[in-house]
Image (cartoon, grey):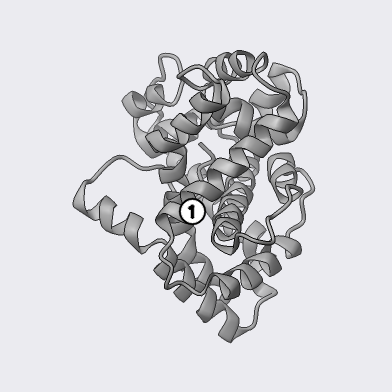
């Protein structure tokens, strides 16, 4: 499989699989059991905890695609519960638990982990701090299924971070990108206050950003051989099949494969 074909085949499944983890009530329940109040505290403190004890404006700038007030509220709400480092570790545990519950035991996760780690190792983390933080998180050696889900999460963070960079390079704000992707009403659900419709003339900028995102990810997938890319796409397809089936059964609004929310 050619590099561009592999990227096109895996971007959406990887995004949606991670999206389902983040929005699952079971994930939120792990946060509640850890001491977080219901809401965005566990999500914000856990996902962005890899940045360390960063000030609110830094966290807002790094994540990009969520409304700044939503991020500030969640980050500050989670701060009294546990340190950023501990919250990130707790969130990683939730990632792995969700993977164990949703990845079929028939999947060759050992082979997936080998190929996914090659991609992760090949990535240049410059200007991608959220990805760099998640790449630095340790993987369990005795939980290959959970480790596979964690690698899905890391790859999702890479594309999201690349896309945020590409969006800004093309002269769009993250708010405008979200409105173009979702519409103003749905963008408001992601924390943007009173988002306004975006001029249709801005749409080509987002399309250009998508192409730049692909170019930024190209070196990762180019590190695999033709056969390895084919195998990786097959494994991602099998690994994410249950979620894709559920999305077909019950249509919902989704972000694009590279959106970082």
Residue 54 in the image, given as x and y percentages of width and height: 76, 23
With respect to residue 255, does 248 lie above or below? Answer: below
With respect to residue 73, does 213 lie above or below? Answer: below
Q: Residue at x 71, y 31 (%)?
A: 86
| Horizontal side of residue 148 vs 187, given as left or right | right
Query: Which residue is disc 1 drawn over?
Result: 99
Instruction: Please tell me which residue lies in front, 237 or 254.
Output: 237
Q: Residue at x 55, y 50 (%)?
A: 96
Q: Residue at x 53, y 74 (%)?
A: 232
Q: How many marks?
A: 1
Query: Label 1's element?
Result: helix
Residue 139 in the image, given as x and y percentages of width and height: 69, 55
Q: Residue at x 23, y 46 (%)?
A: 251
Residue 203 in the image, given as x and y percentages of width and height: 43, 41
Residue 181 in the image, given as x and y percentages of width and height: 40, 39
Q: Residue furthest bottom?
A: 227
Q: Residue furthest left?
A: 249
| Horizontal side of residue 230 vs 244, given as left or right | right
Instruction: Please tell me which residue lies in front, 169 or 243.
Output: 243
With respect to residue 175, does 110 lie above or below? Answer: below
Residue 148 placement: quadrant: bottom right
Instruction: Please tell me which residue lies in front, 196 or 7.
Output: 7
Looking at the image, can residue 257 be seen? no
Residue 115 placement: quadrant: bottom right
User: Quick one: label 1, few (<14), some, or many (20+) residues within 10 Å?
Assistant: many
Looking at the image, can residue 84 be seen? yes
Instruction: Please tell me which residue lies in front, 186 or 55.
Output: 55
| Horizontal side of residue 142 vs 133, given as left or right | left
With respect to residue 103, does 25 lie above or below? Answer: above
| Horizontal side of residue 112 vs 178, given as left or right | right
């Amino acid at each position: 499989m050619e590099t561009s074909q592999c990227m096109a085949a895996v971007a959406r499944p990887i995004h949606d699989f991670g999206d389902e983890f983040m929005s699952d009530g079971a994930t939120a329940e792990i946060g509640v059991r850890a001491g977080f109040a219901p809401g965005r505290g566990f999500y914000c403190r856990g996902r962005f905890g890899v940045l360390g004890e960063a000030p609110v404006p830094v966290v807002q700038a790094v994540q990009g695609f969520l409304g700044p007030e939503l991020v500030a509220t969640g980050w500050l709400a989670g701060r009294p519960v546990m340190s950023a480092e501990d919250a990130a570790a707790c969130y990683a545990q939730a990632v792995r638990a969700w993977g164990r519950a949703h990845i079929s035991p028939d999947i060759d996760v050992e082979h997936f982990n080998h190929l996914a780690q090659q991609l992760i190792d090949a990535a240049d983390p410059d200007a991608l701090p959220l990805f760099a933080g998640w790449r630095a998180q340790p993987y369990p050696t005795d939980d290959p299924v959970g480790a596979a889900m964690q690698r899905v999460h890391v790859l999702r963070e890479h594309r999201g971070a690349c896309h945020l960079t590409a969006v800004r390079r093309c002269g769009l704000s993250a708010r405008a990108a979200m409105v173009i992707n979702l519409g103003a009403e749905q963008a408001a659900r992601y924390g943007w206050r009173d988002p306004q419709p975006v001029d249709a003339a801005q749409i080509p900028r987002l399309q250009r950003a998508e192409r730049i995102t692909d170019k930024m990810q190209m070196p990762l997938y180019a590190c695999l051989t033709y056969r390895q890319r084919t195998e990786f796409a097959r494994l991602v397809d099998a690994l994410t099949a249950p979620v894709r089936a559920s999305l077909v059964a019950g249509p919902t609004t989704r972000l694009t494969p590279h959106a970082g929310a």
